[in-house]
Image (tube, rainbow, N blue to C red):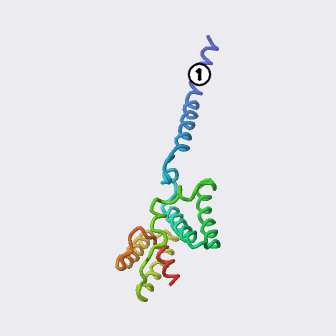
Amino acid sequence: MKSLRIFGILIALLSPLLCVAQYQHQDNGDRRNQGDGDSHGRWEGRLSAEDQSRFDSYYSRWLNYRQSNDREQMASMENRMRDVMDHNSIPRDTDFSRIASPSAGRNSRRDIPRFSGDDARRFRSYYSRWQGYRQTNNQQQVASMEGRMRDVMNHHGIPDDVSYDEVMNMLNRH
């Protein structure tokens, strides 16, 4: 009778652990299969908004450099994408297209209109300040600079899905 009581206590103590182990096994299976059949779903939502934006910017530029066969710049973008991947524990053999947002590869090699001297100067100033405010986590000023950059971009008909980094790259090329 005593051994039966001990056995019952052991079962009661171990059953929560068995449930947790079973849940973890099921959860791992769900994650492994998540997104099968589409090119993006597997890593969607896994990156912070900032990391996703950075990765998308690198990916878009990498596609452009691939089109122009600029191997040096391609390697640079690959290293940057892999840094983001490493930071987020994404396996290095994962295709970049599975991490990038669906819109990141669209419109590669965009034709962004040239800004006037004043607009270019203003955008560069907003962008520089925006980066500083992001580093100090001043969300109010970050939002203010984003609004100002969007105003300049909207004035020139630049779509909302074009990143601030892409506009700066365009300004630096011209």
Query: Compared with residue 45, is residue 57 higher up or lower down, i.e. above or below?
Result: below
Give the amino acid at mark 1: Ile
Nearest the eye: 156 or 125: 156
Q: Which of the 4 image quadrants contains residue 32?
A: top right
Residue 148 percent location from the top left of the image: 38, 77
Q: Residue furthest top?
A: 1
Residue 136 percent location from the top left of the image: 51, 71
Residue at 43% across, 89% down: 117
Query: Compared with residue 40, is residue 3 higher up or lower down, i.e. above or below?
Result: above
Residue at 58% across, 30% down: 18
Q: Is residue 75 left or right of residue 112?
A: right
Query: Compared with residue 1, is residue 107 higher up or lower down, i.e. above or below?
Result: below
Nearest the eye: 20 or 168: 168
The quadrant of the picture occupied by the N terminus is top right
Residue at 53% across, 62% down: 51
Residue 166 percent location from the top left of the image: 48, 73
Secondary structure type for disc 1: helix
Query: Compared with residue 133, is residue 88 higher up or lower down, i.e. above or below?
Result: above
Q: Residues within 10 Å of mark 1 (few under 14, many from 20)?
A: few
So how many labels did they put on this image? 1
Residue 63 percent location from the top left of the image: 54, 67
Residue at 52% across, 67% down: 60
Name the residue tied to disc 1: 9
